Image (cartoon, helix red, strand yellow):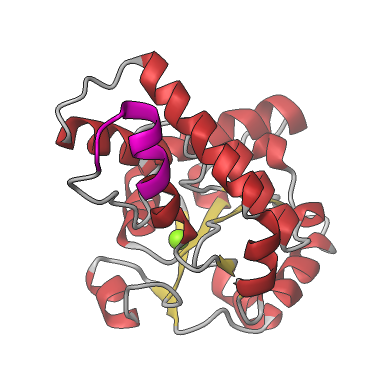
Amino acid sequence: MDQHLVLWDVDHTLIDSLGLGGTAYQRIFPEVTGKPVREPALMDGRTDLGTIDQMLRAHDIEPTDEVVAEMTAALAGVFDEVRVELAEKGRVLPGVRDALAAFGADPAVHQSVLTGNTAEVARIKLDAFALLDHFDLEIGAFGDDHLRRPGLVPVARERAERKLGIDFAPERIVLIGDTLNDVRAAHESGARLVAVATGSYSADELRSAGAEVVFDTLPAPEDLRAALG
Ligand SMILES: [Mg+2]
């Protein structure tokens, strides 16, 4: 049986974390740089590295390795502090637990994440919602791996090959995500995409951007599997 690598986006695909990401940037930026926030952080399916780079440049700060590392560490610190609040006020989106359990029981599916969150923040979020056990995070790709989301797909592919000894051809890699950046990541890498309109983009907007398989919300496991072919 053909093996598949299913890579889930985190925010607005698996969970709704109450916009805490934007709030975190508002807080860490002045702490790390000593400057007030003039331009808000742009997120929206970007990687944290990309968001940090953009935010620093928008404030005329050179994104050196040092300041970027300070920003990512501060980001993890904030999410570690709000772990409990996240679990209390945020939520796992409908259908997610069923889909994760179904793929988890399928020996032909290897499941991880492809997310704009840094590895540490992704781990904190998944742990807060007791979702961590469903994923092999060693074969995922994260917001601190690349400036642009499409660059994350080859990272996950290489990690999966190294750990599992399976070279997943792009058509056997499936991204599940909610933004135009998820669409871009699939198109640029040749991976397949299941788009869900559970974030800020409507199903029509995702379709117009070229997503072929679009659901309003995550479907039942059998429909999700059928969509994978
Ligand atoms: Mg998302």
Image position of 117 with respect to 183: above or below: above
Q: Is residue 95 above or below residue 86?
A: below
* Residue 31 is covered by the magenta coloring: yes
Above or below, 37 relative to 32: below
Q: Residue at x 69, y 24 (%)?
A: 162
Q: Main secondary structure of the magenta part?
A: helix
Q: Which x, y percent locates residue 224?
A: 61, 76
Residue located 43% across and 31% down the image = 71
Q: Quadrant of the N terminus?
A: bottom right
Q: Residue at x 75, y 76 (%)?
A: 98
Q: Is residue 109 visible?
A: no
Of the pair 37 and 141, the residue shown nearer to us? 37
Horizontal side of residue 117 vs 125, given as left or right:
left
Q: Position of residue 51 (x, y in %)?
A: 32, 41
Residue 142 lies in the magenta-colored region: no
Residue depicted at x 60% and y 76%: 93
**Viewer-side residue, 133 vs 108:** 133
The quarter of the picture where residue 179 lies is bottom left
Q: Which residues are magenta?
A: 26-36
Residue 128, x across and y down, in percent: 72, 58
Q: Quadrant of residue 138?
A: top right
Side (left or right) of 101 relative to 188: right
Query: Is residue 113 among what the camera can see?
Result: yes
- The tally of labels here is 0
For ligand 1, the image quadrant comes to bottom left
Q: Nearer the viewer, residue 32 or 179?
A: 32
